[in-house]
Amino acid sequence: MLNSFWGFMFFMGMLSGVWISIHSNSWFGVWAGLELNLICFIPFIIQGDVVCSEPSVKYFLVQACASFLLFFSGVSMMNYMGVMKSLITISLLMKLGAAPFYFWYLWVGNSLKWIQFLSLSTIQKISPLVLLFFSGLNKGSEVLIYLSIIVGGVVGGIGGINEASLRKLLVYSSLNHMGWMMMPLMVENELWLVYFFFYCLMLMMVVWILYLLKLYYLNQMFSVSISWIAKLTLFVSFLSLGGLPPLLGFFPKFIVIEMSSGSLMLFSLFFLIMSSVITLFYYLRASLSVLMLNYSKVKFNFTFSEKFSMILIMIMTMIGGVMSIMFFQSFLQ
Amino acid sequence: MNHSYIFMIYFMFMMAFMVFFLVFKHILSSLISLEFMALAMFSMFSLSPMLLKSEMYSSFLFISIVVCEAALGLSLIILWVRKKGNDLFITF
């Protein structure tokens, strides 16, 4: 996508849409940035082939409806304050693909290639999350966000058990991680951004390996043409996404637990911890089947850059968890 | 034209929003209800500054972005029809 001139322009338009909607004073600027983001993301999904018409139409319909609702309720908030506050939150949850509005995310995510899936899960989530944080509408009426956290956590945990498609598995895991991210966001704590950054990093690591190996379904992982170093990297990346302690993915969960363990949010924290154990189950199922079945030593025929990226992923995952505890000591006070 | 007419435009928008969620057969119907939402908002942008006696430039900016989005929606329908042969949500 970044090879051609118009591809580059569309990608920059996507990022400027996010930038505009984050930095604007009024709901007009927010809506303009969200529309720019949507208009530039649709060609990014399609990229010239007709096969991707179906996810792009579904994505477009949901996001256009949600941004109209956001604009309308933002503009008319002077007259109907209570209703419009919850409508703004509802429209932002619809844009995120958080619970209970996650069905479009499942359909669209299952039909995209890996690079587009990654940008759908990371870049397109930035502006609704920032808007949820900065709008400050969740102080008095937190019931809606609590619903989203608990339902998202539980559905993200249990829903992925019966899935064979790797993209749907990662969609359910992102539902779970959305629940974790909205815990600090609800009490206007900046730690949600730390969690979001680490989640983007871990997801990028997993998706990069799967993109290199061109794996889209669980039964493709049993193939013998995957070299053992790729299998090991995939195993470590999936475990880090599930949140095992010395690896990178444990640290953001730890700071959320630390932040909310003495407060009234203990009830939703219980649901989140239980459901993240279930997500660890399906990550383990996906990655152990890679390691254990039909193992034969093959020469790995990757290029230098692919080998370099795999080694970098292993280093970041294993050492990054310990290093970030050292660097972020101030957060844990 | 007094201030209580704004309520009619709120009603228009909410009806368009509800109609968007009722299940249709054709994708073009969903696009039409999106345009109706945009029309309700455009009339709200045009009428309320008139009532408050302030300037009304924001409606031009709004309508230009909405037109871009409508054109994108139509070209997406054309892509759908090229693949599937009709613009229905469910084909057998």
Image: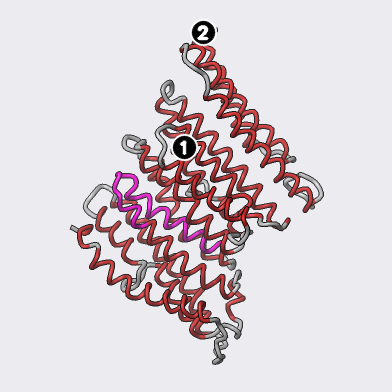
Name the residue located 36 percent from the left edge and 57 percent from the top edge: A195
Chief SS of the magenta region: helix
Where in the figure is residue A294, as x and y percent of width and height? 57, 88
Distance of label 2 from label 1 (alpha carbons): 30 Å
Name the residue located 52 percent from the left edge and 17 percent from the top edge: B7
Q: Is residue A204 above or below residue B24?
A: below
Could you tell whether A203 is left or right of A112 in the image?
Answer: left
Where in the figure is residue A302, as x and y percent of width and height? 55, 82
Mark nearer the viewer, 2 or 1: 1
Q: Are marks 2 and 1 on the same chain?
A: no
Where in the figure is residue A177, as x and y percent of width and height? 42, 57
- The residues colored magenta run A168-195
Q: Amino acid at mark 1?
A: Val
Query: Does A172 appear in magenta?
Result: yes
State the residue in front, A53 or B75. Answer: B75
Could you tell whether A63 is left or right of A185 in the image?
Answer: right
Q: Amino acid at mark 2?
A: Asn
Task: Check whether the beta carbons of the residues at disc 2 and disc 1 lie within 8 A of each other.
Answer: no
Where in the figure is residue A204, as x and y percent of width and height? 47, 65
Query: On the image, numbered disc 2 is attached to which residue?
Result: B2
Q: Quadrant of the C terminus of chain A?
A: bottom left
Query: On the image, numbered disc 1 is attached to which residue?
Result: A30
State the residue in front, A277 or A253. Answer: A253
